[in-house]
Amino acid sequence: MAQAKRDTWDDDATRQLLIKRLRSWFRKQKRDLPWRHTSDPYAIWISEIMLQQTQVATVIDYYHRFLKRFPTVSDLAAAETSEVLQYWEGLGYYRRARQLHQAAKKIVDQFSGSFPREFAQVLDLPGVGRYTAGAICSFAYDQPHPIVEANTQRLYCRLLALEEDPRASASQKRLWDFAERIVPAKSPGEINQALMELGSLVCTPANPKCGECPIVELCPTAKLSLQDRIPAPPKAKSFESVYEVAWVVWDGSKVLLRQCQPGERWEGLWDFPRFVCDLDTHDKEKFYKQELQKRFGLKTQGCDERVKIKHGVTRFKITLECFDTSLKHGPNLSLGAFQWLDSQELGKLPLHSTARRIAQHIARHPRQRKLFDDD
């Protein structure tokens, strides 16, 4: 399709009309969200990182709890990584929490605990990209920085009638250029929030509410009825099936946990001893126990099926089978950090999602039967 309406946004009057209608709509329709009641860059930063790949409704309770425990960047920097991860537990994508902690330490070391005001300094923080830096600087300091994230990207594609893949580098450049052209000098933070809100509530991926849109008459996609084609949908993901085994190793009433090491999935979180296996392994229980000893220095007796969990992580579809067993010897402490906890105290450590599900299963169903020596 020809680049119809592309030059429309070069007209100052059109841009001003866009801003005027957005501002009026947002002041009437905006959601009452906790991070909109502050100009504290630290609190805004926390909200923006939490909102990455996580729904607003999920984030609100985490946001309040996290700021109650870590009310300042100095409090966050002084905390142990394990405690930061524990307050993040359930939000997923734990790299965000580790990078928050690293960034807090950098702010304390380089800026004496005061959140930086310069865009380049904010952008240089671990875990902060161009969008997040722009959002912090515009929401906290009212600086005129453009933003492009999932909701505004979709909105901009439709305002530009952009049929090309929005994830392509050329499309990204065009979207950022457009965002830069429309961000106003006056109250840019309010307009950036309005753009995000409009994308979230009205300009939705499927069945956008064009009849409720304050700028529909400026939208070439609506005029051409191309909402189902713009933006272009992402390519279907291909998933790889993976089979994993996790072990609840008992020593009396205590259960063994292992901390995930640097470079491993869920680094810094705690897990039950676990490894990837071939689903078609012959005499699998014997093989699994040999692997348990080889990988963690754990010699055990008995093998009792506990629970099977199916879940997804990025491009993997994982089938996790969990077994109970009893300790005879181990673990080898040179192979990681281990801790024994009473089965009712597993919540004391930060666990990732499937480890938490196993812990909850243990709480509901303690050792189901005696594990006999099978050697």
Image (cartoon, rainbow, N blue to C red):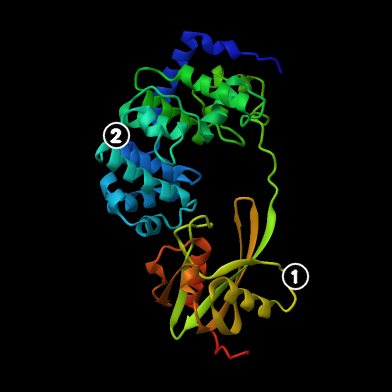
How many labels sit on residues?
2
Quadrant in which the N terminus is drawn: top right
> On residue 39, which mark appears?
2
Query: Which of label 2 and label 1 is nearer to you?
Result: 1
Q: CA distance from mark 2 to mark 1?
A: 56 Å
Q: Quadrant of residue 169?
A: top right
In front: 210, or 192?
A: 192
- Give the labeled residue for mark 1: 280
Pick the front one: 229 or 47: 47
Mark 1: give few (<14), some (14-19) or many (20+) Cα within 10 Å. few
Name above or below for residue 179 compared with residue 299. Answer: above
Identified by mark 1, the residue type is Asp
- The secondary structure type at the circle numbered 1 is loop
Q: Residues within 10 Å of mark 2 (few under 14, many from 20)?
A: some
Question: From what the image shows, is residue 234 above or below residue 168?
Answer: below
In the rendered image, residue 264, in percent from the top left (x then y), is placed at 53, 57
Q: Residue shown at 43%/20% (left/top)?
A: 183
**Residue 70's x, y, as percent?**
29, 51
Residue 72 seen: no
Q: Earlier in the sequence, mark 2 or mark 1?
A: 2
> Whole-percent x and y of residue 302?
59, 86
Q: Disc 2 on helix, strand or loop?
A: loop
